[in-house]
Image: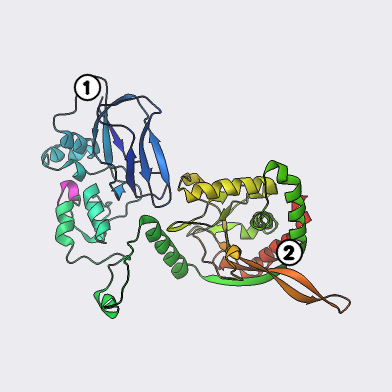
Amino acid sequence: MVQIIRLPALSPTMETGSVAKWHVAEGDAVESGDLLVDIETDKTSMEVEAVDSGIVGKILIEAGAEIVAVNTPIAVLLEDGEALPENLSTFINEEDSPPAAAEESAAHTEVAIEDTPPPPARHERPQQGSDTRIFATPLARRIAAQKNIDLKSIKGSGPHGRIVKSDVEEARGHQAPLAAAATPSDLLTQYEGREFTPIPLDGMRKTVAARLTEAKTTIPHFYLRRDMIIDSLLDLRHSINEVMAKQDIRISINDFVIKASALALQQVPAANAIWAGDQILQFKPSDVAVAVAIEGGLLTPIIRDAETKSLPQLSVEMKTLAARAKSRKLMPSEYTGGTFSISNLGMFGVENFDAVINPPHASILAVGASQRRAVENEDGSVGFATFMSMTLSCDHRVIDGAVAAQFLAAIAENIENPLLMLL
C-alpha cells in the first residue's frame, strides 16, 4: 500500500519547518523505527523515524528546503515490490482532497508535486468573509512567506478555492505586507554611502521579533524592583560546592534563584498562573523557564516541578537543558509551557534591567550582577554586604500589584535565608 510521509508538526504551534537532511535514499528499505529525516524549526532540530516498514519510493522534498508547511507530502513509502502510482501528483491530490472534491481533483493532473495541497491544518484561519479555512498549496505558502504576502485576502483559483502558485504570483504586486516588511527604500537612502552588511532574518529571529512585539503591545507590563542581600547564600553555596566537588557538581547562583522562585510560586499561588484569553489558568506545580542565549536568538527550556527538586538536581538538569538548547536539540516538550521565566544577565556585569514577559507566562524575573556595598550595622558601625538586584515584570491582567509584591517578597525571603530552601 502506498503511504505518504508528511512533514510532522513538532509542536502544537508549528506551521512550517525545514528539511535539513535525509538519512535514506530512494530505493532504500526501511524498518519501523529507522531514522528517515532531520526536520528543523526556528527553535529545534528533530530526527523523524519511520512508523512502518517499506521501500522509499520517492523523495518529494529535497534536503535544504525551507518554509515547508506542516502536513506537506515529503516522501512516498511503498511495500516491497510495489510500484509508484502512474501519476503520483494526482494520487496525492486525491489523497488530500475531501471526498466531494475527488472528481474535480482528477481534472488538475498538471499540478506539480510541490504544488500538491496538504489536508487543512487545524491552525489555519478562516478567509475573510467566509466560514471556510484557508486552503493553499505548500508552494503557494512558501512563496507567500518569502514575499511577506498575506494569504487571507487572496482568492484561490484551484479546486474548491485553493490558493495556488499563480494566485500568489498575481497578487504579489498589490497585497498588503505582513509584519516583517521589506526594508523601506527611504531608510536605505539615509545610509547611502555608508558601509554595512545586511543580515537576513532566520526563522528564530523572526519568531523572537514577533513574540516580543506581541508581548510589549498586548501585555500590560508593570515592574517591581528589589535589592537582596546574598552573603548567606554565597556562604551556603561555597559549602555545598565543597561537598559536591567529588561528584563534579557545582551549584550556581542561578540554581538558587530557580529554587527560590519555584518555592515562591508555591507560597503565592496566585502568581503561578497564565493569561488564557477568556480565563486565568492557575497551576499547582512550579514549572520554571530559564532564558538561554544561543547563536541568533533565545530559548527558554523549562524545569518542571522545580519546587520538588534539590539544588544538585536543578543544577544538573539546567546544565543539560542549556547544552541541548545551544545545540538546538531540545524537544518541544522541553521549551513549551510553564508559567514563569528567569532571565539572568548578571554574568555580563549588568546591574539591573527590565525583562519582557514571555507569553503566555504572567511574569519574568530579571536578575542582575552582585555588588559589594557599604552598609550601616546595628551598632552604627560601617560594614559591607553583597547585594543582588532583581526586577519582576508582571502581566497586570493576571497578577495585581499586591500579589506581585508578595511574590517578590517570597523570593527575597528564600534568597536571603537560603537554608529555608534545603528544608
The residue beneath circle 1 is 82
Residue 70 seen in the current view:
no
In the image: residue 242, left or right of residue 92:
right
In the image: residue 214, left or right of residue 126:
right
- Say which of 397 and 300 sits in front: 300
Q: Main secondary structure of the magenta part?
A: helix
Q: Quadrant of residue 367?
A: bottom right
* Residue range (magenta): 157-161
Label 2: how many Cα within 10 Å (few below 14, some 14–19, many 20+): many
**Could you tell me residue 85's position as x and y percent?**
17, 29
- Say which of 11 and 159 sits in front: 11
> Would residue 15 be counted in the magenta stretch?
no
> Closer to the observer: label 2 or label 1?
2
Colour logic: rainbow
**Could you tell me residue 115's position as x and y percent?**
19, 45
**Disc ID at residue 230:** 2
**Could you tell me residue 161's position as x and y percent?**
18, 50
Residue 60 seen in the current view:
yes
Label 1: how many Cα within 10 Å (few below 14, some 14–19, many 20+): few
- Say which of 334 and 247 sits in front: 247
Which numbered disc flags the more N-terminal residue, 2 or 1? 1
Element type at mark 2: loop
In the image: residue 223, left or right of residue 324:
right
Q: Amino acid at mark 2?
A: Ile
Element type at mark 1: loop
Q: Quadrant of residue 257?
A: bottom right
Q: Amino acid at mark 1?
A: Glu
Q: Look at 28% across and 54% down and name the residue there.
A: 131
Quadrant into which the N terminus falls: top left
